[in-house]
Image (tube, rainbow, N blue to C red):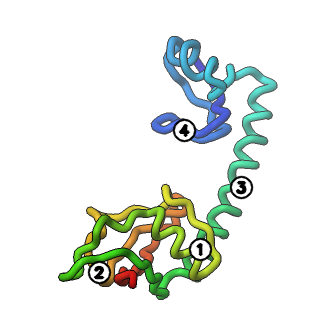
Amino acid sequence: MKVILRTDVDGLGKTGDMIDVADGHARNFLIPGGKAMMASSGAVSQAAAMRKSRDVRDGRDRSAAEDIARQLVGQTIVVSAKAGSGGQLYGSVTTSDVAEAVAAATGIELDRRDLSIDGSIRTIGEHEVQAKLHGKVQFVINVDVAAAG
């Protein structure tokens, strides 16, 4: 069955794509969930408009992500955390902590879900946090964990 996607669906396609899927998948999951609509002659032109607006929005989002990346790359963000002797933290520094520290230091609001930490940050010192603000915009944020007084 040919359907036109109304939203991005992992493994199938992006908004406005016309795809072929199993009849049951379309009738039981995609169409009732509002994720797709049946492909008809009128819907094809609507799909083209959806693809065009998706491309414009994607370009705008990528440009904004690149601007943020340019501002944050090369900077070191300081995060204060309670630590014991030997530099061990009493907990760990999370992506939420990093997002709050970035907002406090630069005024740039990041979503914690766009950040990822390999393992966990449990010691004082320099660490790297991966940021993925867009599918094609990824960069590293340098984080300096300091002991809170």
Q: Quadrant of the N terminus?
A: top right
| Labels 2, 1: front one | 2
The residue furthest left is 86
Sequence-earlier tag: 1 or 3 = 3
Q: CA distance from mark 2 to mark 1?
A: 21 Å
Mark 4 lies on a secondary structure that is: loop
- Which quadrant holds residue 76? bottom left
Judge depth for marks 1 and 4 and give the one in front: 1
Whichever of callouts 3 and 4 sits on the residue coming sooner in the sequence is 4
Q: Position of residue 42 (x, y in %)?
A: 81, 25
Amino acid type shown at disc 2: Ile
Identify the residue shown where x is 60% and y is 81%. 106
Task: Say which mark, if any, is on residue 57.
Answer: 3
Q: Which residue is mark 4?
A: 13
Residue to which mark 2 is pinned: 124
Q: Position of residue 95 (x, y in %)?
A: 43, 63
Label 1 to label 4: alpha-carbon separation: 34 Å
Residue for point 59% across, 41% down: 14
Q: Secondary structure at mark 2?
A: loop
Question: Are circles 1 and 4 on residues that touch, CB within 8 Å?
Answer: no
Q: Quadrant of the C terminus?
A: bottom left
State the CA–CA distance, disc 4 to disc 2: 43 Å
Residue under numbered circle 1: 103
Q: Earlier in the sequence, mark 4 or mark 2?
A: 4
- Which of 143 and 10 lies nearest the eye of the viewer? 143
Label 4: how many Cα within 10 Å (few below 14, some 14–19, many 20+): some
Q: Amino acid at mark 1?
A: Ala
- Crowd around label 1: few <14 · some 14–19 · many ≥20 (10 Å): some
